[in-house]
Image (cartoon, rainbow, N blue to C red):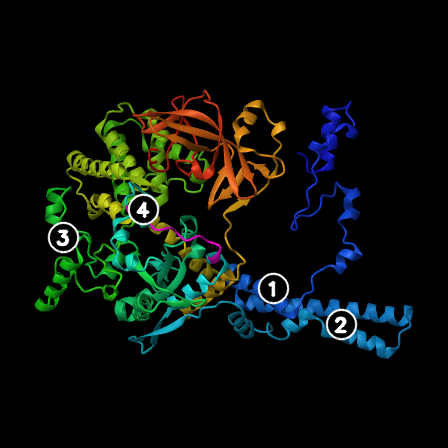
Amino acid sequence: MFTKKSSFTSHMCRKHKACSPDGIDDMYRETRPQPPNCIASTDDSENTHDAMPTASAASDMPEVDSHSYLRNMCLFYLKLQGQLLVPASTIQTIVEEMQNVHDLGQAYTINKVSSLLKNDMSLSDEAVTKICDCIKESDLFSSCHQGQLRTTYTRNQTFKKMFKYTEPRKVALGIDENMTQKFAYYIPVAESLKSFLQSDLWRNTQAQQFGDPDVEVFTDLYDGQNFKCHQFFNENPESLKLILYQDSFEVVNPLGSGKKTHKVLAVYLSLANLPIHLRSNTDNMFLVLLCVENDFKRFGIAKVFSELLADLKSLETDGINVDGETVKAGLYCIAGDNLGSHCVGGFTENFSTSQYFCRYCEITRTEFHADPNACGPPRTPETYATAVEGLQAEDIQCVRGIKANSVFNTLESFHVSQPGLPPCLGHDLFEGVLSYDLALYLKNIIKKKKWFTYNLLNRRIKQFKYKGSEALTKPCAVKPDGAKLSGQAVQNWNLLRLLPVLIGDKVQNHQDEVWQLALQLKDIADLICAQKISLSQIAYVDILIQEYLEMRKLLFPEIQLKPKHHYLRHYSALLLKFGPLMRLWTLRFESKHSYFKRCARHLKNFKNICQTLSERHQMYQAYLLAGQECGTLLQVKESCAFYPNLYSDTIKHAVRELAFSENDTKVTTDIQYKGTAYKKGQFLVYRNDEYMDFGELLLILIQNDTSVYILMDIHKGTFLSEYHLYSVTKDSLGLQCINIDDLPDFYPLVSYILDGYQVIPLKHSIVEK
């Protein structure tokens, strides 16, 4: 396929000297319309005149009215303000300078027209003046920029009238020690939901279906026991299922002089009704509340969340009216890190000394250190209520780890001990258990067994040729004297996954207990992070975790287990309650923080940081609801028509039953589908039953711009028990073409070389079919 005439003629001269253009069959000729955002190639100079608009084409142009012109100008400035985070003063300068340049250009045009009409067409001065006045009066650009878009205030007022802007509401908290009135900024949940339900994105999206009551494979929240036994959602199956997330973050340098001064508590909202790939997009996570953390601690949770709770109660009982239909909503869970979840749930926040440190059971610290696999009586709404009664009766600070009744327990659809506070994988597993234990195992292997050195390990970590998404989250170097890994959650995760590839050739005894413990931790992480998980896998991960905790205490009795090791003990039960825990992946919510951090960095205004951030975010949300950035299911960079006759017999044989033709099928090697990038050379799991087979991606075929098929070269996978990795054979089992939605697992993988094997580290465990 050639897109430039010069490239084609060069190829003809080198390869087909005896062939003339007349001898080229029509089936190999393709003329495609130029995309609207592409510039025609300068090599096709003979086609330049064809690309010029004709008089008839100009007369067929759609008529533009003043409202649509104003709307498009508003969208431009709204994008600058909300998405690109250009300061208001800079936008004002852009408006003024654009108007000045436009005035100069208009004056020049009017002078030329006036001269033409007077001198060449001999029109009277009155007619010329009338025509020039008409040009000035029909100038939509000046009309907008000298009217509704002339100042920052008028622009904002225009945005609010024209688009679905939900204005942040002040929540009065009280007066601080400096006699200053303090506020939190709340975005009404009912208004945000109503605007979203009226958007094109929601109308064009098929909502998640209710889970199968007899399912043996958990694929989403709907398959968990919490949802199936939820009285409110059973009585209101068409209601909205709300997921709240709360967390505090620094908007300035956490090591600088402004640390903790501008630390902000944020609350976000996600809809479980959305399909998984849309739910994980931060653009579809709504801002609910922003409050300075010092004010939150000073005035308390009841005041800060007062208006949010009132709206949630109203959504449960009255719902919202959308196009004449009443839609109710209920709170499904509140996600967050351990500190935030314990604060919201009314549990003790002292994890280092408190006797009761678990929000899922009533185990004591003494019982946990005596037996790491022990679990106390489970917390239920009934036991929670009993503890609250004891708290009020005895007038003490804490009863069985509960220090206050959570304000969210007043809701009909929610209780913190349902459980309603899911675990945080990022902090519990990857920045907790994994971070401490893997550093401990490496220290044992390096200093006691002396299989390799820290210098060798860190050199390999730095020089390793990472592929795919792993290149964006490379593991950090391991400190020789560090008690834990220094990387972030995903970096630690990648280090655990790739550890056998990095130093597997240096392991002198693959049956060594410490090495096996590290591999067992890898298996636990793979199962917990599964996108789909079966009942048998949940039972298996429960056994693995019990064996792991027992061996961890046995091999390293001098290093005390941490509370996060106990939280791990509950994960099998939590998988049954919530379904795959990756559906509540808190680090995806944390990605939303980056918008506010970038906003603060660009605007450099901390006078009222919460008001500034909330208003700027709501402007961006209005831009998104206008339909300008609606995420598409399929994004294709470059493609061309698929001519089966141009390909080898093996490819023809692989696609023969799918009826592809050049009229309805395109071929490419690089797409983004449901938010995941697929490229040639990646591996995908083709089969997972008795054996694990992998397919190397060769081509991507798109039929009718909707159906995506993957053409793969199939290789047999073999499990390497000494590394807990799969290797693929060099021999091909043949080519197969399969619909991308029919694959056992959606996640694309990459391969590395280890001891002569081509190995593939899985991202997570895969359900057998």
| Residue drawn where x is 37% and y is 62% of the image | 258
Give the residues in magenta. 203-213
Q: Nearer the viewer, residue 653 or 367?
A: 653
Residue 443: horizontal and vertical position, in percent?
26, 35
What number is the disc on residue 212? 4
Q: Nearer the viewer, residue 149 or 46?
A: 46
Q: Are the residues flagged by discs 4 and 2 in contact, CB closer than 8 Å? A: no
Would residue 580 be visible to someone looking at this image?
Answer: yes
Q: CA distance from mark 1 to mark 2?
A: 21 Å
Badge 3 element: loop
Asked if 611 appears above or below 59 in the picture, the reply is below
Q: Which quadrant, please, contains the C terminus?
A: top left
Amino acid type at image mark 1: Asn
Amino acid type at image mark 4: Asp
Residue 400 lies in the magenta-colored region: no
* Of callouts 3 and 4, the N-terminal one: 4
Amino acid type at image mark 2: Ile
